[in-house]
Image (tube, rainbow, N blue to C red):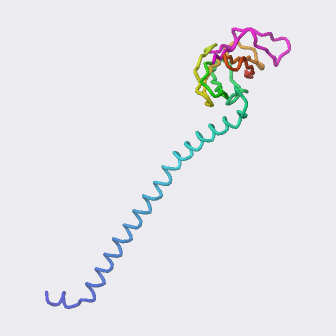
C-alpha cells in the first residue's frame, strides 16, 4: 500500500482527469439545455409575432376615419367549405355607440366565371345575417361572419353588401368579395 500512495503525481493526474471530465460533461449538458430552450421556444415567439402582425395589419387596413374595415375583404373558398370574414367596426365618436351590422343576401352581386351561370342565393350562406354590438368611445369591435359555399355553388365572385348603422353616425356600407373556386 505504501507504494501506491507514494506516487502522488499519478494520483494528481487521475484526479485532474476526473475533474476535467466532470466539467466537460456539465458544459455539454448546459449547452444541450440552452439549444433545447431556443429550439422549443422559437415556435411560441413566431406564433405570438404572427398574432401581433395580424392585429397590426388589420389596424393598418382601417384608416383614422374609417368606420368599417375588413381584416380580409377578399376571400377564396372551395365548394362545400366554410370561411370566416373578420370585420372591424370602429367608433370614431366621443361617446359609446350601439351599432347593427347586417349582410343582406338580396343585395348580393354575382360575377360568374362561366357566362351562362346565374346567381342562386341559396348557394352561399352567411351566418349570422345581423349582429348588434355596443362599442365604447374611440374603440374598435371585432365581429366575425361565417360564409358557406354549397356543393352546387356556381364558380365566380360573390359581392356581399355589409351595412353598419348607428344612431350617432348614420349608415355606412362596404362590400365583402368571396370567390368560389
Q: Position of residue 20 (x, y in %)?
A: 35, 76
Q: Position of residue 112 (x, y in %)?
A: 81, 17
Q: Position of residue 8 (x, y in %)?
A: 24, 89
Q: Is residue 101 magenta?
A: yes
* Left-right relation of 92 to 9: right
Q: Name the image quarter holding the N terminus.
A: bottom left
Q: Name the image quarter holding the C terminus.
A: top right
Total marks drawn?
0
- Residue at x 28% of width, y 85% of height: 12
* Left-right relation of 138 to 16: right
Q: Nearer the viewer, residue 24 or 126?
A: 126
- Residue at x 63% of width, y 41% of height: 53
Q: Nearer the viewer, residue 91 or 107?
A: 91
- Residue at x 37% of width, y 67% of height: 25
Q: Position of residue 153 (x, y in %)?
A: 71, 14
Q: Which image quarter: residue 139?
A: top right
Q: Which image quarter: residue 156?
A: top right
- Magenta part of the protein: which range? 99-127
Q: Which image quarter: residue 72?
A: top right
- Residue at x 66% of width, y 36% of height: 59
Q: Nearer the viewer, residue 29 or 34?
A: 34
Amino acid at each position: 500500500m505504501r507504494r501506491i500512495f507514494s506516487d502522488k503525481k499519478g494520483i494528481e493526474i487521475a484526479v485532474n482527469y476526473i475533474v476535467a471530465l466532470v466539467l466537460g460533461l456539465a458544459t455539454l449538458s448546459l449547452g444541450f439545455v440552452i439549444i433545447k430552450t431556443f429550439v422549443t421556444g422559437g415556435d411560441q415567439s413566431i406564433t405570438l409575432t404572427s398574432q401581433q402582425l395580424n392585429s397590426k395589419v388589420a389596424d393598418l387596413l382601417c384608416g383614422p376615419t374609417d368606420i368599417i374595415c375588413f381584416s380580409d375583404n377578399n376571400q377564396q373558398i372551395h365548394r362545400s367549405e366554410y370561411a370566416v370574414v373578420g370585420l372591424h367596426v370602429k367608433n370614431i365618436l366621443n361617446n359609446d355607440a350601439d351599432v347593427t351590422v347586417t349582410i343582406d343576401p338580396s343585395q348580393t352581386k354575382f360575377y360568374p366565371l362561366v357566362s351562362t351561370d346565374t346567381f342562386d342565393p341559396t348557394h352561399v350562406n352567411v351566418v349570422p345575417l345581423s349582429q348588434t354590438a355596443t362599442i365604447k368611445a374611440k374603440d374598435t369591435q371585432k365581429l366575425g361572419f361565417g360564409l358557406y359555399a354549397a356543393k352546387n355553388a356556381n364558380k365566380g365572385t360573390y359581392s356581399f353588401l355589409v351595412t353598419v348603422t348607428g344612431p350617432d353616425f348614420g349608415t355606412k356600407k362596404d362590400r365583402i368579395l368571396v370567390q368560389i373556386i
